[in-house]
Amino acid sequence: MLYYCVREPDEQYNDTKLLFHRGNRDGPIIAVADPCPEKKYETDIHFFPGNLTIPLRHSHPRHFAAYNRGYHWKGPMANELIEDESNGVVATYDPSVFEGHRMRIGVIDNKQPDMQDIVVITAMVVQERDEECKSKVLFTQNIAN
């Protein structure tokens, strides 16, 4: 399955909104990820069609709930999706770095096919937000006259 992600500026929150298409850029939008207006370090992922919204917390571990079950991305590269109740591995993926403007998510081994979109999109949001945090550098310098 191919997914296409578009970054758009989110002027209201001075952040980035992510639009996920099924297939290529001309495919239907299946999810939008926005910074949560109430909670810092959280992204709200809105899935279409339907009205499923998944708040994804970016603190370690990166946690979300879907279909009345809790999940978290575990590991230094957040490469294992664990179901909280059973502590079982739902999916694994081999994260990769950005290649120019293209993000390759690598290989996903998903043990719950009915959650494929959720697994892939949460993995991409985690990777995107991690990259954003790494790229923000604050440089201050005191200059004495």
Image (cartoon, rainbow, N blue to C red):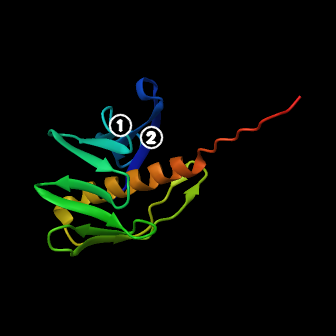
64 relative to 21, above or below: below
| Count of marks placed on residues | 2
Near mark 1 (Cα within 10 A), the count class, few <14, some 14-19 or many ≥20, is many
List x then y, in percent, for residue 92.
34, 72
Image side of residue 74 versus residue 95, left or right: left
Amino acid found under the numbered disc labelled 1: Asp
The alpha-carbon separation of the residues under discs 1 and 2 comes to 12 Å
Residue under label 1: 34
Which part of the image, by quadrant, shows the C terminus? top right
Q: Position of 43 compared to 141: left or right?
A: left
Closest to the camera, between mark 1 and mark 2, is 1
> Does 67 sit left or right of 87 as displayed?
left
Which residue: 18% across, 60% down?
70
- Residue 46 in the image: x percent, y percent? 25, 40
| Residue 109 visible to an observer of this rendering | no
Q: Is residue 143 above or below residue 106?
A: above
Element at label 2: strand
Per the image, the residue denoted by label 2 is 6
- Residue in the foreground of this view, choosing between 49 and 92: 92
| Label 2 Cα crowd, 10 Å radius (few <14 / some 14-19 / many 20+) | few
Q: Is residue 118 visible?
A: yes
